[in-house]
Amino acid sequence: MHNFNNIMETIQMIEKEKLDIRTITMGISLLDCCDFDGKKSRTKIYDKITKYAQNLVKVGEDIESEIGIPIINKRISVTPIALIAQASNDKDYVAFAKILDEAAKAVGVNFIGGFSALVHKGYSKGDKILIDSIPEALSVTERVCSSVNIGNTRSGINMDAVRDMGKIIKRTAYLTRENNSIGCAKLVVFANAVEDNPFMAGAFHGVGEAESIINVGVSGPGVVKAALEKVKGESFDIVAETIKKTAFKLTRVGELVAREASKRLDVPFGILDLSLAPTPAIGDSVGRILEEMGIESCGGHGTTAALALLNDAVKKGGVMASSHVGGLSGAFIPVSEDEGMINAVQLGSLNIEKLEAMTCVCSVGLDMIAIPGDTPDTTISAIIADEAAIGVINNKTTAVRLIPVFGKTVGDEAEFGGLLGRAPIMAVSKFSSSDFVNRGGRIPAPIHSFKN
Amino acid sequence: MKSVVTVIGKDKIGIIAKVSSVLAENHINISDISQTILQDYFTMIMIVDLTKASSNFKTIQNKLEAVGQDIGISIKIQHENIFNSMHKIS
C-alpha cells in the first residue's frame, strides 16, 4: 500500500526541489563505420545513428509523462571519431563533425558526444588530424561535443598533447568569438576519461563497450540541499546519513528510468551515473549544499572537506540503489552552471586555486570556468597539466573545460544560455608557464606503491 | 496498470466530483483515496487502476490537467512505479 507522506515527498522533490533525470544517453559503437573512403564512412555513420536512435527522444518523452519526472536531455555518445576517421585518407575531420551534427538534428537530441581522441600516451595519425580539426568542427556545428584524453594513471601524462590542447582551446575560443567563445564549452580535456559517461560535453562510447547501450545521469542538488535544511546544526554523522538516504532515493528513480528506457528501446542498460549535476536555476546548486553545511560562502575554508563528504556520501547512498553504477558518479562543480558558485565568484570567496583543490575530492575537475581571453595558451596548458596530475596521481578522473572568452577580462561576464549558464571571468596566474609547457614529452606514469 | 493521481490546490467545492467524473468517463477504477487539508490547501491522493481504461495514458493525463486548469488546481497522474522505486526495496 502506498504511504501518503511518501507520495507527497516524491511530489515535493519533483515540484519544489527540482529533482529530474538529467540525461538519457544512448551509446552507439561506430567501429563498423570505418571506410577507406571518408564519404562512405560518413554515410555509414549517419545511417547507423539515425537508425539506432530514431525512437530515443520519443521514448524519453513517454517515460517522462508516464512516471511524471522531467527528463531534461536525450543525447548520444559515439566511439571516438579519431578511431573511425583514420581509416580514411581525409586530411581533416570537420566533415565528420558535420555529419554527427546532422544525425543529432535528425533524431532530435540536443548534444552528441564523441568527436574525441584518446592520446594519453601518444598520437596516432588520426588523433593528430582530429585534434587539429576541433576548433573548426566546434565552430561550424551546433550539437557536437569534443573530448581529448591526455593522461591516465597507467601511462602518465602526454605533455605534447597538453601543450597542443592549450592552442586548440585558444583557437576554438577565437573561432566562436561572436558567441562568447562558446565552442570551448563543448570541449573537455580529460585525464583518466571513463568510457561510459552519459554527461556532456565529455561523453563518448568507449571501445570496450557493447554495440549500443543506455546510460542515465540523475541529478538533484536541490533535493540534497532541502534534506540538509531539516538537520541544521546536527553533527556530520547525521549530515552524511541524510545525504546517503537522499542519494539512494534519487538513484532509485534513475534506475527506474534507465530500465524502462532500456526495455522500450530494446537496448541493454549500461550504467547509471550518480552525479549531482547542478543547473543555473535557483535551488539546484551544489555550491549551496556546501553552504548549507555551514560555509558562509562557497570557497571559504572548509569547502574542500564539505565537498569530500558530499561526494562520498552520494556514492555510498547511490551504489546500493542501482545494479550498475558508472560514469563519473560524484558531485559536479561546473562554475557557470551553478547558481551558488556564480554567486561565490562574484562575492570573491571562490577562485581558481580553491576550485583546483576542490577537484581533488569531487568528480571531474575545473569545469565551465571562464578566464580572460588574453590568457596565453601555455598558461591554459599548464592548468591542464596541474589538473591531469591530480587525476593521474590520485587514480581518479579529472577534466578541464575552460573558456578563454575572447575580448573579455576579469570583471566581465559571459552568458552562454540554457543549462550552460553564465560565468564571471575569473583571474588566472599572471606568471608564465611557457618554458614548462614547451618542454613536451611525457610525464611518466606514477608509482603505485608508497602512497603518502 | 496502477497509477497515482495527486490533486493539490486551494480548497473549493466539487474537486473530488470533477476528478472522479473524468476517471469514471474513462473507465478508470479508484482503488483508494486519501485526502487532507493543510493550511487551506486541499491535498488528495487517489490510487487508480487503468487496466480497463478506455483511453490511453496521455489522453487521460491531458483531460485531468485540463480539469485542473479549469478549477485552478494541480492534478497529476503518474505511474505508481516511481513511488515504489523510491520508497520500497523489494
Image: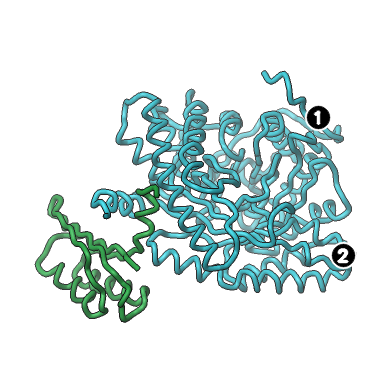
Residue neighbourhood size for the residue with mark 2, other residues' Cα within 10 Å, grouped as few (<14), some (14–19), many (≥20): some
Is residue A342 or residue A178 the one in the foreground?
A: A342
Q: Residue tagged by mark 2?
A: A88
Residue A374, label in figure: none
Residue in the image at 77% along x and 48% along y = A118
Which chain is the one coloured green? B
Image quadrant in which the N terminus of chain A is located: bottom left
Label 1 and label 2 in one chain: yes
- Indicate which disc, 1 or 2, sits on the residue closer to the N terminus: 2
Which labelled disc corresponds to residue A436? 1
- Residue A349 seen in render: no
Chain A colour is cyan
Circle 2 chain = A
Q: Which amino acid does label 1 sit on?
A: Phe
Q: Give the Cα distance between marks 1 and 2.
A: 36 Å
Horizontal and vertical percent for residue A432? 75, 30
- Could you classify mark 1 by the number of other residues whose Cα lies within 10 Å: few (under 14), some (14-19), or many (20 or more)? some
- Location of residue A365 (image quadrant): top right
Q: Farthest residue in the front direction?
A: B90
